[in-house]
Image (cartoon, rainbow, N blue to C red):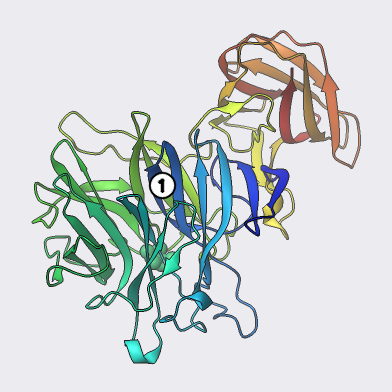
């Protein structure tokens, strides 16, 4: 089931909702999200995605992106995400054509205690045609952001990205078929240099979504590129933020679902590098309703980036006392196990694991049992003929934790057992079917 925590805190004084979520991939499962720019501010990871919504009559084009506002999400452990609510809406921005629903991929950066949120959109006719980029400012990373009355002059295009270099010089990158770059003035609101095309990137196919970062003196220009039919994530390197860049490789192949876009950011948090990107997990039939994801990223000793293979498990530890969504598995048996939506008409209800034949299993890595052994385990499951689940620790032939009989029923049941042989610490959890009576599993949760 949807792993969004069922806790909604109303912050009355601020007038918006905070949703507590626990997430694997996709990270956010109660709404569509795309184009994640992840930043570390004050020791927390903030993700600034764009926000896809389904079109409605008079509100956006049915076959296209529909985006009217931005939320920001934050986490201190990459497992539990807080939705800080809406930080900016199209109808609050003076220069935006508020019939366009075109609040595309944003970025946010901090300078001298102020947070500068850069976003593209379609301007009102008086400001030009196509897309341009504006800035909104806040004293906090979670907003609210107050937009500047006019867009940044001389920028035509989408997907703004900011780099503040070690010497304090700020740069802005954006795309319009190719990638453009310019220096930003110290006020972060105007260009200091004329825009120029970053011309050295692969010659053919659309390139957009620049995200530039520096590591050990190497500047990495990362971007989605249509080399074949849909976008894959690539990168090029330079010893200068403005280039020239040399193509260096593919970070992530095309999405297996065929999602036409991808869009990335890369950050280091607590000495681990992560790739944030998107697929269309919650909308497999319509790739303009996307979902953000994160996976670990690793460098080779020569500074090149190892290709990232997308996972369902994602990143971060999962507390044993949370609902462990084993359908976001780390590995799965070759036979007899599969994943499907709980309700294909409402994908926000999430997924279930289906164990269909004897010894079919799914493995979910990095569950934190803490320093006190849990006393019981609950499993939300459904079995039409009454099947038996076995829970193992660490690997499919690892220590048996417990066996649990799921009652014969056409309804979901939460079954509990206290007969547990558990250890504390961090372990992988394996859920396996003992016999040939199929069982569908929504989640597993331990109690202390
Ligand atoms: O989300 C709308 C657009 O799709 C973004 O601006 C592009 O990068 C692509 O992801």
Apparent side of residue 315 relative to residue 332 in the rendered image (left or right): left
Q: What residue is shown at x 89% (from left), y 42% (from top)?
A: 410
Residue 436 picture quarter: top right
Apparent side of residue 117 relative to residue 161 in the rendered image (left or right): right
* 178 over 249 or under it: above or below: below
Is residue 245 visible in the rendered structure shown here? yes
Apparent side of residue 365 relative to residue 205 in the rendered image (left or right): right
* x and y, in percent, of residue 295 in the image: 43, 39
* x and y, in percent, of residue 120 in the image: 37, 71
* x and y, in percent, of residue 90 in the image: 50, 75
Q: What residue is shown at x 85% (from left), y 27% (from top)?
A: 415
Task: Note whether ligand 1 is within 8 Å of mark 1.
Answer: no
Q: How many marks?
A: 1
Quadrant showing the N terminus: top right
Q: Secondary structure at mark 1?
A: strand
Q: How many neighbours does mark 1 have within 10 angstroms: few (below 14), some (14-19), or many (20 or more)? A: many
Apparent side of residue 42 relative to residue 183 in the rendered image (left or right): right
Residue 108 picture quarter: bottom left
Q: What residue is shown at x 24% (from left), y 53% (from top)?
A: 163
Q: Which residue is mark 1?
A: 276
Ligand 1 shown in quarter = bottom left
Considering depth in this image, is 235 or 10 the residue closer to the camera? Answer: 10
* x and y, in percent, of residue 324 in the image: 66, 32
Q: What residue is shown at x 60% (from left), y 18% (from top)?
A: 396
Is residue 435 visible in the rendered structure shown here? no
Quadrant showing the C terminus: top right
């Amino acid at each position: 089931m949807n792993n969004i925590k069922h806790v909604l805190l109303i912050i009355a004084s601020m007038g918006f909702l905070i949703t507590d979520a626990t997430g694997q991939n996709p990270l956010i499962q109660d709404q569509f999200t795309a184009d994640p720019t992840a930043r570390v501010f004050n020791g927390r990871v903030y993700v600034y995605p764009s926000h896809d919504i389904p079109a409605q009559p008079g509100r956006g084009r049915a076959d296209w992106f529909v985006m009217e506002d931005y939320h920001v999400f934050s986490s201190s452990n990459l497992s539990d995400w807080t939705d800080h609510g809406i930080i900016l809406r199209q109808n609050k921005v003076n220069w935006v054509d508020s019939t366009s629903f075109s609040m595309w991929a944003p970025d946010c950066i901090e300078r001298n205690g102020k947070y500068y949120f850069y976003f593209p959109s379609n301007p009102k006719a008086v400001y030009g045609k196509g897309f341009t980029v504006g800035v909104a400012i806040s004293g906090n990373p979670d907003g609210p952001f107050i937009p500047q009355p006019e867009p940044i002059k001389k920028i035509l295009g989408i997907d703004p990205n900011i780099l503040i270099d070690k010497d304090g010089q700020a740069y802005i990158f954006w795309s319009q078929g190719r990638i453009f770059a310019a220096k930003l003035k110290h006020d972060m609101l105007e260009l200091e240099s004329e825009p120029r095309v970053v011309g050295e990137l692969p010659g053919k196919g659309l390139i957009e979504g620049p995200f530039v970062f520096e590591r050990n003196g190497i500047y990495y220009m990362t971007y989605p590129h249509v080399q074949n039919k849909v976008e894959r994530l690539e990168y090029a390197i330079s010893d200068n933020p403005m280039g020239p860049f040399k193509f260096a490789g593919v970070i992530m192949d095309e999405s297996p679902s065929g999602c036409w876009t991808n869009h990335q950011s890369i950050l280091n948090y607590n000495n681990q590098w992560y790739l944030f990107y998107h697929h269309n997990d919650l909308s497999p039939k319509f790739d303009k309703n996307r979902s953000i994801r994160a996976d670990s990223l690793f460098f080779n000793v020569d500074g090149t980036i190892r290709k990232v293979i997308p996972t369902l498990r994602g990143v971060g530890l999962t507390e044993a006392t949370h609902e462990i969504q084993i359908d976001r598995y780390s590995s799965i048996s070759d036979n007899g196990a599969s994943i499907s939506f709980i309700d294909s008409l409402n994908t926000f209800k999430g997924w279930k694991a289906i164990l269909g034949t004897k010894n079919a299993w799914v493995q979910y890595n990095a569950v934190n049992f803490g320093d006190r052994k849990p006393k019981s385990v609950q499993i939300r499951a459904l079995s039409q003929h009454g099947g038996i689940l076995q829970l193992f620790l660490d690997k499919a032939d690892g220590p048996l934790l417990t066996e649990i009989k799921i009652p014969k029923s056409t309804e979901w049941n939460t079954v509990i057992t206290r007969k547990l042989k558990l250890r504390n610490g961090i372990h992988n959890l394996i859920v396996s079917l003992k016999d040939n009576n199929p069982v569908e599993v929504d989640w597993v949760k331990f109690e202390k």
